[in-house]
Amino acid sequence: MISLLASVVVGVLMAVPSAPADDAAIIKKQLPVYPMKTCAVSGEALEADAVNYVHEGRLVRFCCNGCVKEFQKDPKTTLAKVDRAIIARQAPQYPLDTCIVKGEALGEMPIEVVVANRLVRVCCKQCVRRVTTAPDRVLASLDTTDIKEQLPNYPIKECLVSGEPLGDKTLDIMYGNQLVRMCCKGCKKDFAEDPKPFLRKLHAAAKKTRGEHGGGEHGEGKKERKGEHGGAGEHGGRGGNG
């Protein structure tokens, strides 16, 4: 597998924007996977009034509007810093040993692409072009793989929102890199309005399961998955315009 240092360099060089979307929707979707708790320019801690800024389809977070102006002078340098953090955070949780496009083994030197603040691994430059052409489809495929891997060790047998037993029509969604299971679309809507209490409930259940069985965060899957759900945290901040 490619070394972390080499993968950072490749990931930065190959970083691409997500598909066009409303800024508010981009912020909401990318906050769970955003890896930095400090301003991308100043390095200051991000507080509740942090600026969520969208640049070419990507969320970047700053401590103030002054740092947004500094970012605009040289976006490439700051995005490289964000990409390094994304790769370092998401690489241990990455669920595939094969190319997301061709399905072939990645080998010793896979190319790591940052798409909508998500890490994607491919086998060659041709596949990079295919990822950049249809990023939404690629990320949907990655989510499907993540769901399949996390399902066997999901710690709750009831809907995370309503508490009702999960049945045949269970909705399995990814919040960042974390599987969340619900009984219906109504509960999905309630979760989307305020994920924080439900995530705390899920993380508490996962912690209890680890204590009882001595397993990992998502249990023992095909490969070790370290970290805290790929950064599915409880971010705040005010919106910014790209």
Image (cartoon, helix red, strand yellow):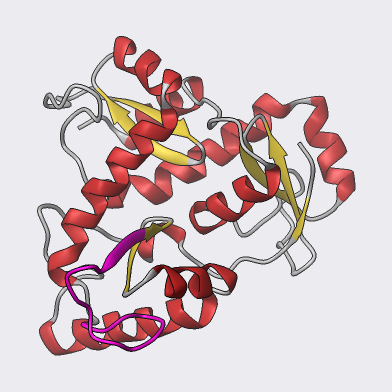
Decide: is 64 above or below 152: above
Q: Nearer the viewer, residue 58 or 19?
A: 19
Q: Is residue 73 visible?
A: yes
Q: Is residue 41 left or right of residue 227?
A: right
* Residue 97 percent across, percent down from the top left: 16, 37
Q: Is residue 227 visible?
A: no
Decide: is 14 above or below 64: above
Decide: is 143 above or below 38: above
* Residue 127 percent across, percent down from the top left: 30, 16
Image quadrant holding the N terminus, namely top left
* Residue 211 percent across, percent down from the top left: 20, 87
**Residue ID at (81%, 30%):** 72
**Residue ID at (69%, 43%):** 23
Quarter-wise, where is residue 157 in the image? bottom left
Give the magenta-colored segment's residue range. Answer: 157-173
Q: Is residue 175 magenta?
A: no
Q: Is residue 48 left or right of residue 34?
A: right
Quarter-wise, where is residue 77 in the image? top right
Image quadrant holding the C terminus, namely top right
* Total labels drawn: 0
**Residue ID at (14%, 25%):** 107
* Residue 96 percent across, percent down from the top left: 19, 41
Q: Is residue 161 magenta?
A: yes
Quarter-wise, where is residue 193 in the image? bottom right
